[in-house]
Amino acid sequence: MVLAQVGYAFLYFITETSFNHGMSPFLYVTYRHIVAAVIMFPFAFFLERNERPKLTFALFMEIFVLSLVGICVPINMYFASLRYTSPTFVASIVNVIASLTFIIAVVLRLAN
């Protein structure tokens, strides 16, 4: 866990440096997704070739909405906030997300 936190802090400093040199957070997210897709594609294609469901329109829309709401928007907001704050602040706020989610769930009576 300590190594993961050190890795995240290192990533924040690299990201902050790239933003300070003029890179757009949106372009950074795009590059990040392209690299992830290139790395993950061979594993997904060869290891799960026989387990894939048929790609219907409903399944495609579900994947699209989940990737938009669950990945693209939060990461874009996250890196945009990194552009306006310090890496130390962003690294500490990430650890608060789980507790805030729990508090919201309790307020909305979704957790016991």
Image: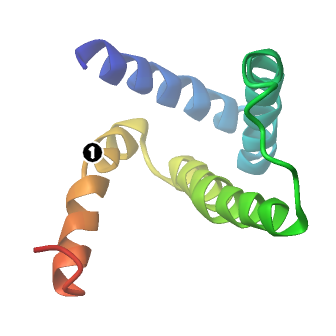
Left/right of residue 84 with respect to residue 105 in the rendered view? right
Residue appearing at x 73%, y 42% in the figure: 29
Q: Is residue 61 visible?
A: yes
Q: Can residue 22 be seen in this view?
A: no
Residue appearing at x 52%, y 47% in the figure: 82
Three-letter residue code for mark 1: Asn
Residue appearing at x 80%, y 41% in the figure: 30
In x, y percent, where is residue 19?
A: 67, 38
Closest to the observer: 107 or 86? 107
> For residue 63, which quarter of the picture?
bottom right
In x, y percent, where is residue 92?
A: 28, 43
Residue appearing at x 51%, y 24% in the figure: 11
Left/right of residue 53 with respect to residue 76 in the rendered view? right
Closest to the observer: 41 or 86? 41
> For residue 95, which quarter of the picture?
top left
Seen as rendered, the residue at the extreme left is 112
Where does the N terminus fall, quadrant-wise?
Answer: top left
Identify residue for label 1.
95
Where does the C terminus fall, quadrant-wise?
Answer: bottom left
Q: Is residue 62 above or below residue 52?
A: below
